Amino acid sequence: MDHSCSYRYSIKNPDLRNTGYIVAIANIEDKHDRSTPSHYHWKILKCRMIIFSNSSILACPDKEDVKKVHIVFNKVGDDYDKLNSLFIKFSLRQDGAIRSTTPEIFKMCFTYTMTAKIAPTWNVLGFDYLVNNRDFLTTNGIQEGVKYQIVSDEFHTDLTLKPVNINIIKATEDIAPGEYVRVLPSLNKAVVEECSKTLPEIGSFKSYKDIRRHWKNIHGYRLPDDETSYYMIRFWRGEPLTYPDICVTRHFPIITPMPRPREEIVLSRFVSCLKSKIPHFLGIPMTIKIKETMELIKVADGRTPVPQTQDHPISLCTPTQNLRQFKY
């Protein structure tokens, strides 16, 4: 019998009628930062600079459009005026009128903003895991993290956390051209086209410093000071991209449960990080309380989760970080 727990936290939403949703269009023809060689990455960096320049707003880059950024802001107060100033500073413009904020848009922007602000203490891995280790890329063996899921309605955002052990299997020898691999942070599948001990000249980056800034500014990852080997990675479309070898793995990470006492420690660390990084948003303090503990028991009869309702309110009210995130 395998015991595993998920914990559901409830975050109170602001009154969505007091929020506005706008789509911003990034000017991708201006001079790019050297850490963002593509238009798409330049748009992402603009979005993240907006997030770290105004702790009240939520934002998310569009996953497909190379120019679009989604932004939710508080209509009560001066957030809209501040946004217009940031648009001028970072070369963006508003596309169309202010729109109503739907729970779907709110969830999308909240999720991206949350993962951006809690990095590098908690680093995105795949589409639903967070690793609790600033130096996880250079750490061997089992590391602690959570599997997370976010669901929003008009009044609340539910954050379901399942503490897990994560083992990212590092390659002990070079991966040969033609081999299929998983790349971080998405864990998408790709193929190795070339292996190089030095930075390839055909790539978009001119130095290891540019690569470190890229991974910090775009993904929140902190690469080590010492330069490593590189892989030229090809996806199903587009030109091959340069990846540090520590961001490439042959296999999907091994995910296993952790002992119940350890789960509480990991959850406490996660909530403490939220207290530090997201004390308020959209004009209100962020408050979070544990809503349910769902015990998942793998048995032959396929028993369903048993919810155990609790009520432990937690006030998140300490300072957040700012744009220094983007400076070395």
Image (tube, rainbow, N blue to C red):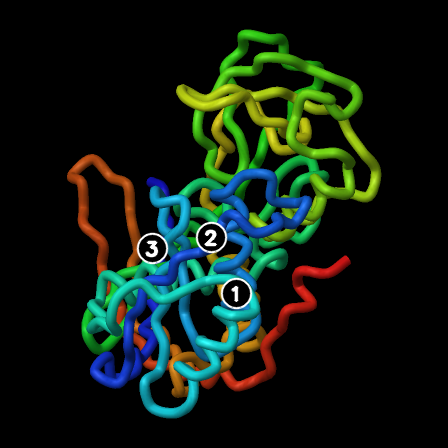
Query: Picture quarter containing residue 290?
Result: bottom left
Which quarter of the rendering shows the C terminus? bottom right
> In terms of secondary structure, where does tag 1 sit?
helix
Packing grade of label 3 (10 A; few <14, some 14-19, many >=20) is: some
Query: Picture quarter containing residue 309?
Result: bottom left
Residue that extends furthest to the bottom in the rendered view of this protein = 77
Q: Which residue is mark 3?
A: 149
Residue 92 location, x and y as percent?
A: 46, 62
Residue 253 location, x and y as percent?
A: 51, 32
> In terms of secondary structure, where does tag 3 sit?
strand
Q: Earlier in the sequence, mark 3 or mark 1?
A: 3
Q: Is 206 left or right of 80, judged from the image as shown? A: right
How far is the residue under mark 3 from the one under mark 1?
A: 14 Å
Packing grade of label 2 (10 A; few <14, some 14-19, many >=20) is: many
Q: Which residue is mark 2?
A: 146
Using the image as rendered, state which of residue 165 and residue 88 is in the foreground: 88
Using the image as rendered, state which of residue 100 and residue 222 is in the foreground: 100
How far is the residue under mark 2 from the one under mark 1?
A: 9 Å
Residue that extends furthest to the right in the rendered view of this protein = 226
Using the image as rendered, state which of residue 56 and residue 35 is in the foreground: 35
At label 3, the amino acid type is Gln
**Disc number placed over residue 270 in the picture, else none:** 1
Q: Is 37 left or right of 315, judged from the image as shown? A: right
Q: Is 54 left or right of 142, judged from the image as shown? A: left
Residue drawn at 60 percent across, 39 percent down: 37
Q: Is 289 left or right of 37, judged from the image as shown? A: left
Residue drawn at 29 percent across, 50 percent down: 296
How far is the residue under mark 2 from the one under mark 3?
A: 10 Å
